[in-house]
Image (cartoon, grey):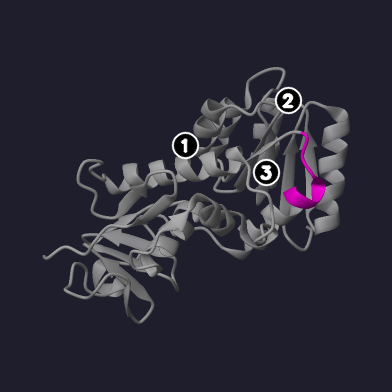
């Protein structure tokens, strides 16, 4: 096995598949490939993949269906690759459980940097593995927004533990993706300061996206999808938000602290 574990490339274009194989091998993965969706599902299961690159346009079943099938047995990091820059594709991929979404043609260095950033920030524990509210510290206390008890940030009944990377709402654990957790953490620690969409793209993308890196519409759209998923999991009321407020034309900020 490679130093970073097992990577599976699911791609029907031979040239792109060979390129991905080379990039991931150079990064330190043991790489296995498949040219169809069904074969890709089998390889991902048999090899217990840690990272998967998944083409949307496969010859037998499309990448979204492959994503759905893989998510039934694997929590591997999955990066979707597509030749189409359409908002619906981005939404479908991220809501279906993909960790990232890259439009072809892509730069090998960018792909490698995004995967490296994902691996450096591990997944949030699932609900079953998350600590109870007692372990996370008191929830819904009168502490100011973003205040810390140990490693816990609290706001309006929400508790985010930075050490265990777990989140609980009213004592009930929430299952968040890595990107959702990182975005929520950024807004909580901002204690009401506005974060632009470009700021939040850099939070999701990691160190690859510096201050002078061009932020595309696709990057900002992906952040909007992640925020939308967060709101859905928090059951946020768009007319009376408790946590995530949209600042039109700019980005997002934390909602004001409420009296309990």
Q: Distance between the Cα atoms at labels 2 and 3?
A: 14 Å
Q: Does the magenta-highlighted stretch encompass residue 107? A: yes
Residue bearing the label numbered 2: 36
For the point 83% across and 34% down, the residue is: 16
The one of 218 and 122 positioned closer to us in this rendering: 218
For the point 78% across and 34% down, the residue is: 105
The reply to whether callout 2 and callout 3 are in contact (CB within 8 Å) is no
State the image quarter where residue 100 is shown.
Answer: top right
Disc number lying in front (1 or 3): 1
Task: Specify the farthest residue to the front.
Answer: 249
Disc number lying in front (2 or 1): 1
Residue bearing the label numbered 1: 95
Secondary structure, mark 2, is: loop
Q: Is residue 32 left or right of residue 142?
A: right
Residue bearing the label numbered 3: 52
Secondary structure, mark 1, is: helix
Q: Position of residue 227 (x, y in %)?
A: 41, 46
Q: Position of residue 203 (x, y in %)?
A: 55, 59
State the image quarter where residue 41 is shown.
Answer: top right
Q: Distance between the Cα atoms at labels 2 and 1?
A: 22 Å
First of labels 2, 3 by sequence position = 2
Q: Does the magenta-highlighted stretch encompass residue 30? A: no
Q: Is residue 73 visible?
A: no
Figure quadrant of the N terminus: bottom right
First of labels 1, 3 by sequence position = 3
The reply to whether callout 1 and callout 3 are in contact (CB within 8 Å) is no
Classify mark 1: residues with Cα within 10 Å, few (<14), some (14-19) or many (20+): some
Task: Specify the farthest residue to the bottom.
Answer: 150
Magenta extent: 105-111
First of labels 2, 1 by sequence position = 2
The one of 74 and 219 positioned closer to us in this rendering: 219
Q: Position of residue 202 (x, y in %)?
A: 58, 57
């Amino acid at each position: 096995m490679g130093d970073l574990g097992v990577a599976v490339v699911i791609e029907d274009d031979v040239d792109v598949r060979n390129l991905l194989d080379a990039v991931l091998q150079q990064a330190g993965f043991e790489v296995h490939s498949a040219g169809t969706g069904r074969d890709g599902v089998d390889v991902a299961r048999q090899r217990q993949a840690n990272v998967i690159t998944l083409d949307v346009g496969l010859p037998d079943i499309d990448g979204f269906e492959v994503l759905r099938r893989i998510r039934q047995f694997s929590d591997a990091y999955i990066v979707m690759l597509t030749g189409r820059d359409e908002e619906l594709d981005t939404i479908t991929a991220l809501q279906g459980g993909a960790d990232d979404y890259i439009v072809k043609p892509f730069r090998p260095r960018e792909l490698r940097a995004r995967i490296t950033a994902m691996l450096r920030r591990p997944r949030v524990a699932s609900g079953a593995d998350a600590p109870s509210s007692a372990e996370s510290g008191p929830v819904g206390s009168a502490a100011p927004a973003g205040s810390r008890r140990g490693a816990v940030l609290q706001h309006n009944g929400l508790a985010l533990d930075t050490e265990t990377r777990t989140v609980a709402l009213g004592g009930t654990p929430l299952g968040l993706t890595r990107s959702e957790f990182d975005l929520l953490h950024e807004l909580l620690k901002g204690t009401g300061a506005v974060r632009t969409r470009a700021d939040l793209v850099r939070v999701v993308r990691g160190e690859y996206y510096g201050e002078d890196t061009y932020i595309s519409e696709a990057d900002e759209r992906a952040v909007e999808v992640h925020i939308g998923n967060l709101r859905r999991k928090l059951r946020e009321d768009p007319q009376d938000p408790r946590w995530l407020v949209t600042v039109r034309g700019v980005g997002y900020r934390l909602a004001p602290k409420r009296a309990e």
